[in-house]
Amino acid sequence: MANSETLALVGSETLLGREMRDLLSSSSLGQDLRLVAAEAEEAGKLTVQAGEPAVLTPLEGQSLDTARVIFLSGAVESFEKLRRFAPSAHIIDLTYAAEDLPDARLRAPVVEPQGYLAPPDTIHVIANAAAISVALVLGRLHATAPVRRAIAHIFEPASERGAQGLDELQQQTVGLLSFKGQPKDIFDAQLAFNMLSRYGEEAPAALEDAELRIERHLATLLAAAGGVPIPSLRLIQAPVFHGYSISLWVEFETSLGVSSVEAALEGHPVDLRAAGAEPPDVVGIAGQGGLAIGNIAVDRNNSQAVWLWMVADNLRLRAENAVAVAHELL
């Protein structure tokens, strides 16, 4: 049994932080978790972890000096303090704060080759959930029949913009139904009852930047998957709170029937909905691990191509991979 200070979670009050707490509470690792306030959080705040009262400790050396693994799930500004206060700890970054550093490695154990080990001093950056999902599917399909090309339409949930994104979508929806004004601080556009190919000019983050990140992460994950071609992709902001929906078109070097595609995809962590079953959706996948795939059909205009519909809880899938990295490190 590890010490009670083996793990630290910085940013436990964010959406990802709460997902990490929920996932760790059902794991043996959850008994060894210390909750640490991120830059924007209030140290000393009373919260709950694994059904028991817990207090957010301040972000300082005393809170982190015995931690072997630190999860960063909030306030990217906290990253430099983590490196200063806990230089010997393994950092698992869920905020992308460290993704451009030379000692960072993109991690997604669910799609990594068996036996993969990162260098000892690695900063472990957890990949985007949409990139993980597409890489997993294309990797399995390519192992069955060579993939010639693919196209992915990715529908992004508001929760990828954090709690502020959720609040703005909710307030816009209520405002429209009650004929009131709409806040536009996050999207700088109407998202409620709408779909966006880009945000407004005053949005703090651009949708194009999120699209480029998914593409970068996908290229990195596929590089170890045996020559799978990188798909063309388009990111669309959808008026949903949680969960990625992805429409994936895949063309093979030869014709591959639906049954062969289903056989290639079956197995953990995929919930495969075979022909005749109800296709998955983001409402049903909320809080569930892995990804669900259904509504697989051969392209009517190209017998060598198939369409797939896939969904994943964006927060849960990333949290699962972060916990898998922690198990590996410990």
Image: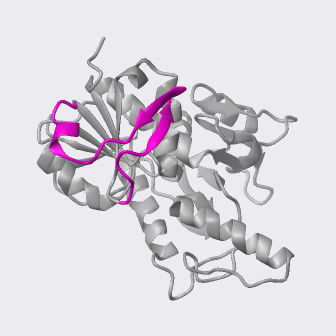
In this rendering, does residue 98 appear at all? Answer: no
Is 13 in the magenta?
no
Left or right, 30 with respect to 267, comes to left
Relative to 299, is 48 on the left or the right? Answer: left
Does residue 207 sit above or below 35 in this rendering? below
Q: Nearer the viewer, residue 43 or 228?
A: 43
List x then y, in percent, for residue 14: 48, 51
Q: Which residue is at a point 58% across and 66% down the rendered structure image?
A: 165
Q: Look at the picture and state if 295 lies above or below 31.
A: below
Q: Residue furthest bottom?
A: 201
Residue 224 visible somewhere in the drawing: yes
Q: Position of residue 270 (x, y in %)?
A: 62, 32
Q: Which residues are magenta?
A: 40-67
**Foreground residue among 179 and 47:** 47
Q: Is residue 278 left or right of residue 51?
A: right
Q: Is residue 51 magenta?
A: yes
Report the colour scheme. one colour
Q: Nearer the viewer, residue 11 or 275?
A: 11
